[in-house]
Structure formats: structure tokens, C-alpha cells
Image (cartoon, rainbow, N blue to C red):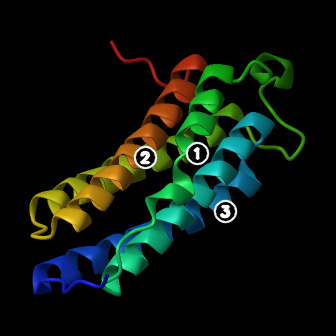
Amino acid sequence: MAFKLTQKEQQLLGDQLNHEKVCIQKYSSYAQQVRDPQLKQMFNQYASEEQNHYDTVSQLLSGQPANLGMSAGQGRQQGQFQRQGGEAAGLQGNVGAAGMTNQEDATILGDMLMTEKFVSGAYDTAVFESANSDVRQALQHIQKEEQQHGEGIFNYMSQHGMYNPK
């Protein structure tokens, strides 16, 4: 069953579509640059989830209800990355095979944490400014997954001495 979006919803969804595209590009690119295989796997998984978000927002923009079942199990997989937390990190030393240093990984992680904070905040605005309850529900679902990405990045950074909240 198709629905009509308000002009504001169209604008907000268009913005979110662009944000998701950037997230896909960043996670895919950074997955090739980081040294830790666990981090590479996490970034590839997040890129896949961001692609699902992109597809969902595209569906909404076309006036179609979101198919949220596509990403239902992915949050559990993401949590698995958080718990594994770099058990191999101590074995890698400060410089990985590709020459990436721990500081370079930390810079990449900091960029992605900042990106996830921004994207989650943009979803917050979109949720509040959507007139359609189906759109709101889909955006809340995506926002929760964006927050899980941020949590995974934060936990990885904390566990590897890259972020120390005091």
C-alpha cells in the first residue's frame, strides 16, 4: 500500500538517503584501510547494514512501506563484534601488515563515531518531523541501528585504549 509523503518528509528522507550513501562509502573505504581484521569485519558489516538503511529510505521516498525484516538479525551480529572487542589486538603490535598504526585506526574510528553521532541526530529530527507513523517507525528502527554502530565503535575504541571517558 503506497502512501503520500509531505514535502518535509521528502526533504528529510532525501537528506537521510545522502547520509546513508556517505556512510556506505566511508565504511567500505575504511574497511580496506584498517589493520585489525576484527575491525575490518565490523566495518564491512556496518557497510552492509548502511546499504539496508539506504534501501529502506529509498523505499520510503518512493511512497512504499519499509521492509524492516531485511536487517532484523544484524543487530545481534553487530553485538557479537562488540563483545569480541579485539581479542587479537594485542597480538598485532603497533603497526599492522599494511603499515597502519594504532593512531591511524584511532583517527578512522573517531571519524566514524563522529559520523554516527551526526547521522543518529539527523534521524532524531526526521522522526520528530514526520507526519506518517509508518515513516516514523522505520526511521526509529534505523536510528536504533545507527546508535548500535556508534556503540560498537565506542566499545572498540575503549577496549583498545583509543577513547577513555572520564
Circles 2 and 1, Cβ within 8 Å, touching? The answer is yes
Per the image, the residue denoted by label 3 is 29
- Separation (CA) of disc 2 from disc 1: 9 Å
Residue 107, image quadrant: top right
Q: Sequence order check: which comes first, mark 3 or mark 1?
A: 3
* 5 or 164: nearer the viewer: 5
Q: Residue at x 11, y 58 (%)?
A: 128
Q: Can residue 36 be seen in this view?
A: no
Q: What element carries label 1?
A: helix
Q: Image quadrant for the N terminus?
A: bottom left
Q: Is residue 102 positioned above or below 8 on the image?
A: above
Q: Is residue 90 positioned above or below 108 on the image?
A: above
Q: Is mark 2 on a helix, strand or loop?
A: helix
Residue 166, image quadrant: top left
Task: Name the spot of residue 50 as percent of width and height, x first.
Answer: 52, 60
Q: Residue at x 62, y 21 (%)?
A: 83
Task: Name the spot of residue 57 as percent of width and height, x first.
Answer: 38, 72
Q: Sequence order check: which comes first, mark 2 or mark 1?
A: 1
Q: Which of marks 2 and 1 is in front?
A: 1
Left or right side of 118 for 80: right
Task: Name the spot of residue 29 as percent of width and height, x first.
Answer: 67, 62
Q: Can residue 97 be seen in this view?
A: yes
Amino acid type at image mark 1 = Gln
Per the image, the residue denoted by label 1 is 74
Task: Name the spot of residue 147 as percent of width and height, x first.
Answer: 38, 41
- For disc 3, the neighbor class at 10 Å (few under 14, some 14 to 19, many from 20) is some
Outermost residue to the top: 166
Q: Which of marks 2 and 3 is in front?
A: 2
Residue 165 tag number: none
Left or right side of 43 for 118: left
Q: Which residue is drawn at 57% across and 62% down?
A: 26
Amino acid type at image mark 2 = Glu
